Amino acid sequence: MRTRLFTLLVVVVATTWFICSTTKAEILVQHLGSTDPETEGWALTNTGVDASSIGALTPDTGYEDAWMLNDDSASVRAYYRDDLTTAQMETLDWSNVDWQLDARLRVTSYDTMAYRCPTVHFVTPGAYTETGKDYIMDFGADAEGNAIVQLTGLSGTNTVTLDSGSYHDYSLRYNASTGTASLYINGSSTAALSGYTGTTKHSGYSATTSFVRFGSTATNSIGGANYSLVQFSVVPEPSTATLLGLGVLAFAVSFGWKCRSSQL
């Protein structure tokens, strides 16, 4: 009897592991290292930032390969944008999708904590009057040059100051079951900020518009960063594996109990 139950439990674990391992994140948008973002599918909007302030760093002195974008004027802006395709927006059930917005960057110039300068953010599908949202990571630095990250629109404490001005990893992870996003920094398993529901989608964006942007998206402040990674990925229906695994477990327990009862 014990051998039979043990075998069933092994099947449960193996089945759940297989499903979880095959339910992987799908990368929809990505910038890597010193590659020109325009060759990766990003579109550049530049209203006057000097061309010498945008380009490849191979490597960023003392660090790693990255793409520089430095806006040193409070009257211009420059940023990259990559739109999700119609197929991506239509085939994904956005009400049941966990997503992740990752960035690895070093702040190089700043106006303390500037609004969207520099920034990395994701605009969801949906009308601004309904489900459409902006999820925004804004960056800056303090007087000592220590990096600051802000989740714009998060109530209460919405900033984190780090202990250096070097490269840092930022991962904004959205949980569809809670409807909130949490920010993880430098690989920590503990969220630095949580409970983020984003901000209302800008009224100028249509319901069928969804994209990722990075760079300087505001004209009233300065700010620059070197971007080693910007990536957006999704995990469709993340709860499926868990539910199926629990279902198999329930069946195994029930089957084992029936077998045991029949022997009494």
Image: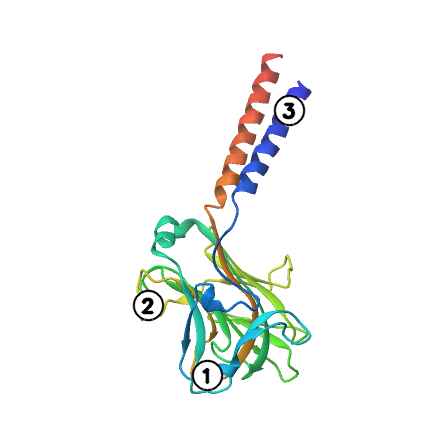
The quarter holding residue 61 reads: bottom right
Which residue is more in the foreground, 58 or 181? Answer: 58
- According to the picture, the residue beneath numbered tag 1 turns out to be 49
* Residue at (42, 64) in percent of width and height: 82
**Mark positioned earlier in the residue sequence (3 or 1):** 3
In the rendered image, the vertical position of residue 138 relative to residue 251, given as above or below: below
Please provide percent x and percent y for residue 94.
Answer: 40, 52
Real-space CA distance between mark 3 and mark 1, rounded to the nearest whole angstrom: 65 Å
Real-space CA distance between mark 2 and mark 1, rounded to the nearest whole angstrom: 24 Å
- Check disc 3 and give the amino acid type: Thr
- According to the picture, the residue beneath numbered tag 2 turns out to be 205
The quarter holding residue 166 reads: bottom right
Classify 10 Å Cα crowding around label 1: few (below 14), some (14-19), many (20 and above).
many
In the rendered image, the vertical position of residue 96 relative to residue 210, given as above or below: above
Name the secondary structure under disc 1: loop
Which residue is more in the foreground, 196 or 166? Answer: 166
Which residue is more in the foreground, 257 or 222? Answer: 222
In the rendered structure, find residue 81 and report the number of the disc placed on it: none
Q: Is the C terminus in the top left, top right, bottom left or bottom right quadrant?
A: top right
- Check disc 2 and give the amino acid type: Tyr
- Check disc 1 and give the amino acid type: Val
* Residue at (57, 82) in percent of width and height: 109
Residue 12: in sight, yes or no? yes
Q: Residue furthest top?
A: 263
In the rendered structure, find residue 7 and report the number of the disc placed on it: 3
Nearer mark to the viewer, of 2 and 1: 1
Classify 10 Å Cα crowding around label 3: few (below 14), some (14-19), many (20 and above).
few
